[in-house]
Every structure is written in C-alpha cells, then in structure tokens.
Amino acid sequence: MKRLFLGMAIAGGIIVFLGLVVLGSTLWHPEETETRTLGMLLTAFGAMAVSVPLYLEARRIQSALNKSKQDLKRKGASRCAACGEDVASFLCTSHSIGLCLKCIPDHHDPARCLYKPVLQRNSASSRGAKAHSWR
Ligand SMILES: [Zn+2]
Ligand SMILES: [Zn+2]
C-alpha cells in the first residue's frame, strides 16, 4: 500500500512536470490554446495525484499518533497491585505499590504502611500531596 502511494506521488510529480513543460512551450505560441489547456489539465491532474497519497499518508500518521496517545493514557492509569482490576487510588509508599480502596484494608500493616493519594489527572500536583499514615 505504501509503495503504491509512493508510486502515485512520483507519477503525479512527473505529470506536473510534463504539464509545466507543455505550458512553458505554449508561452512562445499564444495561439495554441489547446496545448495550453492540455498543459493545465496535466498540471492539475498531477497535483491531485501527488496530494491524494500525501493526504492519505498524513491521515494514517495522524491516526497512528492518536492510537499511541490512547495507549499511553491507558498505561498511565496504574492498576491496583493486589486485585489488578481497579485503578489504584492510593500508593503505599513503604512498599511502593498502588492499591485500590477495596484492597487497602487487606494490605494494611499499621506498623509499616504509609499512603499517598494517586492523582491520575495532574501528576505535577501530586508532589504537593503529603504522605499520611493510614491510622
Ligand atoms: Zn484492588
Ligand atoms: Zn504497604
């Protein structure tokens, strides 16, 4: 598919070039309106043949970019280390694992565990969040 696009773009470029050559040759022969029309048609057709694959390629790249962005988002939301199903809303800083609200009571060790809320949306503000004891 990509090779086809490239071929189309190259062929389009050649057609544009031919069209310009034909157009240029009519500069000294203003009476040859048919040749000039042909040159214009060739140029326009060639430009289209170039822009269609470029447009499609740009669309493809854009959708690929969007997809990788979505993947990143999915990865960014860390899962609960205990059940692996819910999004971790607290981080045990002593054990450095993320836990959901359901699993915190199971994991909790009053002597050791310290929790910090996991802020999914704005990671910059999580620096301001103080670690607090779950006691
Ligand atoms: Zn959980
Ligand atoms: Zn812990």
Image (cartoon, rainbow, N blue to C red):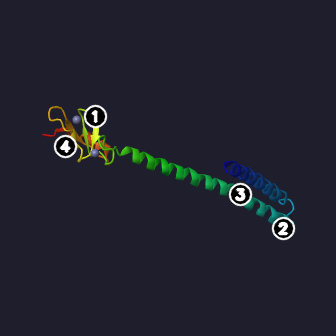
Q: Position of residue 93 (x, y in %)?
A: 24, 35
Q: Nearer the viewer, mark 3 or mark 2?
A: 3
Residue 37 picture quarter: bottom right
Compute the Cα span from label 4 to label 2: 87 Å
Q: Residue at x 80, y 59 (%)?
A: 23
Q: Residue flagged by tag 3: what amino acid is it?
A: Ala
Q: Residue at x 14, y 35 (%)?
A: 110
Is residue 30 in sight in this rendering?
no
Secondary structure under tag 1 reads loop
Give the residue pinned by disc 4. 105
Give the residue pinned by disc 3. 49
User: How crowded is the residue under tag 3: few (<14 C-alpha within 10 Å), some, or many (20+)?
Assistant: many
Secondary structure under tag 3 reads helix
Horizontal side of residue 121 vs 39, given as left or right: left
Secondary structure under tag 4 reads helix
Q: Nearer the viewer, mark 3 or mark 1?
A: 1
Q: What label does residue 33 carry, if any?
A: 2
Q: Earlier in the sequence, mark 3 or mark 1?
A: 3
Compute the Cα span from label 1 to label 4: 16 Å
